[in-house]
Amino acid sequence: GFRFPKGFALLAGVEGPGLPSALRASAVSIPMEGGVESLNAAVAASIALYAWRSAEQASGRGSYVRATAKTGIRNKSRR
């Protein structure tokens, strides 16, 4: 299966044209059921971030970023 590299950038495609062709060469996609043409960029980004966070937790690194209503985004290891 897919493994997230230690460093990466999450780029949500522009709805319609998608990512520029120069970026598509190293892009990965989210598997979808037949009949589903595409996902909203926000939904796709949410799925990717959930998968990344789950992988971080499973690996024991625990340095994932979490969003909180009070403090915004922070690194969990700096509590």
Image (tube, helix red, strand yellow):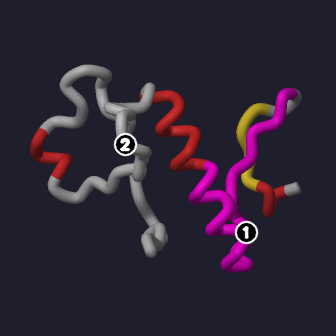
Which residue ends up furthest to the left in the rendered image? 21
Where is 22 relative to 19, above or below?
below
State the SS at label 2.
Answer: loop
Quadrant in the picture for residue 28? bottom left
**Residue 1 horizontal side relative to residue 37, left or right:** right
Q: Residue at x 30, y 25 (%)?
A: 14
In the figure, is residue 37 to the left or right of 47?
A: left
The residue that disc 2 covers is 34
Classify the position of the C terminus by image quarter.
Answer: bottom right
Q: In the rendered structure, which segment of residues is drawn in magenta?
A: 50-69
Instruction: Answer whether labels 1 and 2 touch (C-beta < 8 Å).
Output: no
Query: In the rendering, at what x and y percent does residue 27 appear?
Result: 27, 54
Q: Is residue 30 above or below residue 67?
A: below
Within 10 angstroms of label 1, few (less than 14), some, or many (20 or more) residues?
A: few
Nearer-N-terminus badge (1/2): 2
Q: Residue furthest top?
A: 16
